[in-house]
Image (spheres, helix red, strand yellow):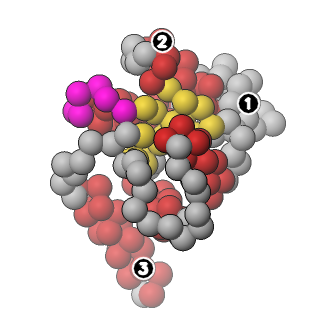
């Protein structure tokens, strides 16, 4: 019973979190990796994440910069970040200068930390642990089943 209740609460929270209206314009749109096909192209799950990121980017007038976040697994031809960059520029026609790559991470926490380092450096922000009130706004694009964990990690660091 406890497991079912926890799962139901997580499902409701994830759905409501996704549906909350957002009127903010984001400086950065972080897209978390989700594995690659054997030929190095994004899996359907990863393509869905990238497409959601592009929809947000288009909704805000094609402003902001993507941070494609994901390293290269031992069974992958390229990093997830490189695969996303190719898909964004070649298939979705996003300008190359609107895509940054974080290609060293292997975990969700690393995705967030390394992406933050890139955004801080590009924005001229000194990173201070526990500091709130950043000089930029960023959106995190991931899957519904992953949003709770990713948002909790983002609030921690």
User: Residue 100: x percent and y percent?
Assistant: 55, 30
User: Residue 89: x percent and y percent?
Assistant: 47, 16
In this view, the residue farthest toward the right is 74
Instruction: Tell me how far mark 3 sits from mark 1, CA to CA.
Output: 34 Å
Residue 19 horizontal side relative to residue 64, left or right: left
Circle 2 residue = 90
Q: Earlier in the sequence, mark 3 or mark 2?
A: 3
> Which element carries disc 2, helix, strand or loop?
helix
Q: Which mark is residue 31?
A: none
* Residue 61 within the magenta-colored segment of the rendering: yes
Circle 1 residue = 76
User: Residue 12: x percent and y percent?
Assistant: 30, 69
> Residue at coordinates 22% horizontally, 51% vertically from top-left?
22
10 Å crowding of disc 2: few (<14), some (14-19), many (20+): few
Residue 64 visible (yes or no): yes
Circle 3 residue = 6
Residue 53 horizontal side relative to residue 88, left or right: left
Highlighted magenta segment, given as a residue range:
59-64
* Residue 24 within the magenta-colored segment of the rendering: no
Q: Earlier in the sequence, mark 3 or mark 1?
A: 3
Q: Nearer the viewer, mark 1 or mark 2?
A: 2
Residue 48 visible (yes or no): no
């Amino acid at each position: 019973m406890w497991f079912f209740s926890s799962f139901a609460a997580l499902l409701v929270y994830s759905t409501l979190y996704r549906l909350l209206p957002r009127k903010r314009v984001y400086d950065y749109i972080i897209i978390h990796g989700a594995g690659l096909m054997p030929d190095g192209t994004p899996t359907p799950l990863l393509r869905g994440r990238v497409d959601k990121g592009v929809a947000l980017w288009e909704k805000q007038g094609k402003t902001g910069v993507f941070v494609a976040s994901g390293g290269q697994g031992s069974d992958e031809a390229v990093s997830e970040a490189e695969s996303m960059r190719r898909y964004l520029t070649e298939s979705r026609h996003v300008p190359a200068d609107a895509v940054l790559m974080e290609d060293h991470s292997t975990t969700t926490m690393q995705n967030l930390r390394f992406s933050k380092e890139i955004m801080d450096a590009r924005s001229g922000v000194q990173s201070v642990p526990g500091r709130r009130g950043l000089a930029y706004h960023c959106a995190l694009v991931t899957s519904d089943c992953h949003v709770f964990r990713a948002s909790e990690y983002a609030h921690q660091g």
